[in-house]
Image (spheres, coloured by chain):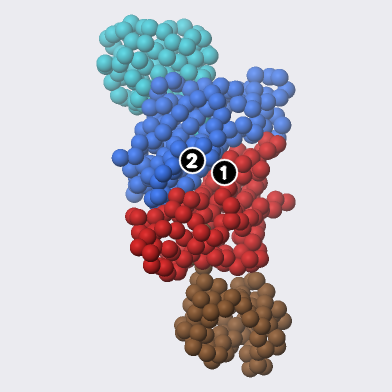
Chain colours: A red, B blue, C brown, D cyan
Amino acid sequence: MTTPIIHVQREDFDLQTEIDRLTAGRMDIGAVVTFSGLCRDEGGSLDALELEHYPGMAEAEMRRIGALAIERFSLMGMTAIHRYGKILPGENIVLVIACAPHRQAAFDGANFVMDFLKTAAPFWKKEHLADGTAGGWVSAKDADDAARDKWAKG
Amino acid sequence: MTTPIIHVQREDFDLQTEIDRLTAGRMDIGAVVTFSGLCRDEGGSLDALELEHYPGMAEAEMRRIGALAIERFSLMGMTAIHRYGKILPGENIVLVIACAPHRQAAFDGANFVMDFLKTAAPFWKKEHLADGTAGGWVSAKDADDAARDKWAKG
Amino acid sequence: MKVRIVYFAWVRERIDKPEEELDLPETVVTAGDLLLHLKTLGDGYEAALQYPDVIRVAVNQEHVDHDEPIAGAREIGIFPPMTGG
Amino acid sequence: MKVRIVYFAWVRERIDKPEEELDLPETVVTAGDLLLHLKTLGDGYEAALQYPDVIRVAVNQEHVDHDEPIAGAREIGIFPPMTGG
């Protein structure tokens, strides 16, 4: 039974290294889809994001979501890595990798994990603004709930 | 205007290197989706795939498909790399990268390019079988046409 | 019931502490009861929990709805809607 | 009309050459006409083009339908359905 590889970490990640971890020595994986989420500078107004998380629960939720995706899309490999702390524009925030025999399952698996990770994994973003003000906590988006709800089974 | 980066090559590729090429120095990309297609051994029956292509036209079709995706999904970066020659099980065949401000456009862009690449880019796979027989040319799948046709605008 | 409460993001900032141990009265049965109880503990709590409907609660690091009981909780997390990813 | 014809995959194998230069008769107007003409050139061509409906044609490296004219073609590619990706 495939179990997800989950990391909540300060450091950056390397996509090829993380993919190799899932595919090394395997001859049955035909499709690998990765999603990486990066920090945007919002047209120059953002200096940095501060990522807070709930240690322990963050990993547990990511593991739960990853396992759901593995079962639902028959994935052969799944990695989810979420960074915390101060993240600068252009830097990575999150990585999801899904491996499957064929491409649609890999696409759906990675997309599914991102939709649930955004709405269920306990992470919060605070903005540091370029004008020196503290900025505020990013608001949750209804669009993220809608993206998650599209996976509800009819 | 963003133009796609297209390579038809014998050599393997490194995902992180290819992503860095698209995102280096940029602060406006929030989402990067990659698809890599790997050679499967079909339960041990396949020794290798031989990838033939139409030089010149292969690059032109990939460039045309990449440009369509950039326009349709407002992508900020797009790379498509297709290998040729003998490919062993576990090795990479194809890579597509799509960059966008937000995640759904990046997912759709990469998925779109794969669907059209499979049905329109002039590449052909021949199987070398483990039992020493030559195997045959892989047949085109109706499912690939159906996957492409889902992008037809209503 | 003694329980460890942990706060995150702007809930933590407004209450002005990351965690505390509280002895809850027996009238606090559900997660929703807990939020109403905490609101009575001072201005910071009042500011943090002004709109309890938007607040998320986790019991022993698992999400719970506001109408679920918190009996048996060792750790309760209280935080705004998540914005990771 | 003189034109360079290039073959790929099992079309190439059955015709047993990767490319050739042909002088086409004036009766060959469309891509479909060309396939029917090539079928008359020998057993290999007959085997390769037995079911012309499945064969793809590219004029100057762009896909064309069988009913499209090939006038002005410098290079015509003839090949089975694509299976890359």
**Viewer-side residue, C10 vs A104:** C10
Vertical position of residue A61 compared to residue C66: above or below: above
Considering only vertical position in the picture, is A50 above or below C13?
Answer: above
The front one of A71 and B154 is: A71
Residue count near mark 2 (Cα–Cα under 10 Å), binned few <14, some 14–19, many ≥20: many
Say which residue appears at 65% left-offset and 59% top-offset.
A63
**Amino acid type at mark 2:** Ile
Query: Is residue B44 in sight in this rendering?
Result: yes
Front-lying residue, A17 or B71: A17
Between A52 and C33, the one nearer to me in the picture: A52
User: Where is mark 2, residue-wise?
Assistant: B19
Name the quadrant containing residue C37: bottom right
Q: Amino acid at mark 1?
A: Leu
Q: Position of residue A123 (x, y in %)?
A: 54, 65
Residues at circles 2 and 1 in contact by the CB criterion of under 8 Å: yes
Asked if residue D60 lies left or right of residue D10, the reply is: left
Q: Within 10 Å of the Cα at label 1, are there few (<14), some (14-19), or many (20+) other Cα atoms? A: many
Name the residue tied to disc 1.
A15
Q: Position of residue D77 (x, y in %)?
A: 40, 18
Q: Is residue D46 above or below residue B105?
A: above
Q: Chain of mark 2?
A: B
Residue B47 at x, y = what percent?
A: 68, 26
Indicate the position of residue C13 as horizontal and vertical percent values: 51, 76
Alpha-carbon span between mark 2 and mark 1: 9 Å
